[in-house]
Image: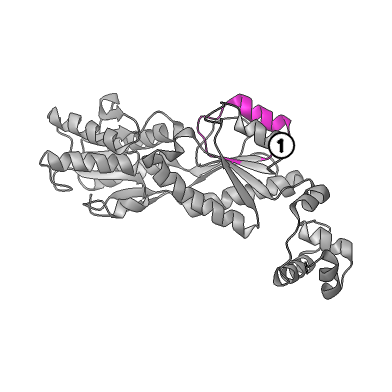
Amino acid sequence: MAVTIKDIAKIAGVNYSTVSRALNNSPLVNIKTKQRIVTIAHDMGFEFDANARYMATSRTGTIGIIYPDDFDVFGAHLYYSSLHNQLRKSLEKMDLDLIVAFPKNHYTNKDNIKRLVGSKKVDGLILANPQMEEETVTYLKENGIPFVFFHHLKIMDNVDNITTDNVRGGYMAARHLVDKGRSNILCIAGGKDPEFLDRVEGCKKALEERGIAFSSDNVVTVYKSYESGYKAAADAFSDGKPYDGIFATTDLLAWGAIEALKELGYAIPEDVSVIGYDDVEIAACIRPALTTIRQPKEEIAELTCERLYKRITEPESCGTARRILIEPKLIIRASC
């Protein structure tokens, strides 16, 4: 027989309305009582009906995550899948479900975000898409849908951004190369999204601080794939340019560059030091193992989910929008 709110109220020694408020995270119930009721409900195997919850709170208990269209591409998927696992864990701690979507339906080209919002399927959105249009953001604001930009920095007024400090990460990468005695550094950038531009800017800043000239000639902008990293390094070193270090703005680009250098007869790190960015799972498996800049995925995911949850449940206490930049970490392995 299904457990009811009345059953929980009887065991907890409180009235029916208190249980209902506690299970819907109402601020009218003190934290101790709320925790006790939630524990009893879980112990009894209570499942709160989604339709009833929506009628009581106008909330679905579901969060939407919007990924970019290239989510399924091998290189992008390596990183996003790891991020996604962290998001899922953080949302599960909050007893929230998730829906994964992309900006547009691949078959009908209809706007998935407007569909999710219009059908009242989500309480809020995590936006992991660097190409999000301003029109979409305006739509979300006008419809009162809480959202947080996650991982990608979006330069807009009054929006929450939680991401890695990419300028700092690029700076750390270049500084490590210089500390290893490298002075002629090739930067392989994975496109012109803000995160990659920031990493290049950080690299430039570190080199200039050490009195090392850095110009646009030091930068090759390509697609963020293994093949592109391979070709960029092969072309640069086949031309006989005297690079002794490579900073690639993704680990996949760095991997491709390493394979090209090995085929050309360069020893790594003796002849050329290579450093990547992200610290995806394969970074430690590349040979030589890849020195890289780790993005703190767990912290980014947890802060994003906490911020969005607060936007949903306590909007009046959120204050102004926040831009939170999280410090990356240098992971030293054999390629430097």
Looking at the rendering, in which quadrant would you find the N terminus? bottom right
Rendered location of residue 164, percent (x, y): 47, 44
- What are the residue bounds of the magenta stretch? 126-146
Left or right: where 57 falls relative to 322: right
As rendered, which of 240 and 286 lies closer to the eye? Answer: 286
Q: Give SS at disc 1.
A: loop
- Residue 327 showing in the rendered view: no
- Which residue extends farthest front? 1
Q: Nearer the viewer, residue 221 or 109?
A: 109
Who's the residue at 75% across and 47% down the image? 59
Residue 175: horizontal and vertical position, in percent?
Answer: 30, 44
Q: Residue at x 13, y 44 (%)?
A: 271
Q: Position of residue 252 (x, y in %)?
A: 32, 42
Q: Answer few, some or many: residues within 10 Å of disc 1's Cα (few below 14, many 20 plus, some between 14 and 19).
A: few
Q: Is residue 164 left or right of residue 64?
A: left
Name of the residue lying farthest toward the left = 265
Q: Is residue 129 magenta?
A: yes
Q: Which residue is mark 1?
A: 119
Q: Amino acid at mark 1?
A: Ser
Could you tell me residue 258's position as x and y percent? 21, 43
Relative to 298, say whether 68 is above or below. Answer: above
From this viewpoint, is residue 246 visible? yes
Write the residue at 63% across / 30% down: 137
- Please, is residue 210 above or below residue 83 in the view? above
Q: In the image, is residue 194 part of the stretch drawn in magenta?
A: no
- Where residue 233 sits, quadrant-wise, is top left
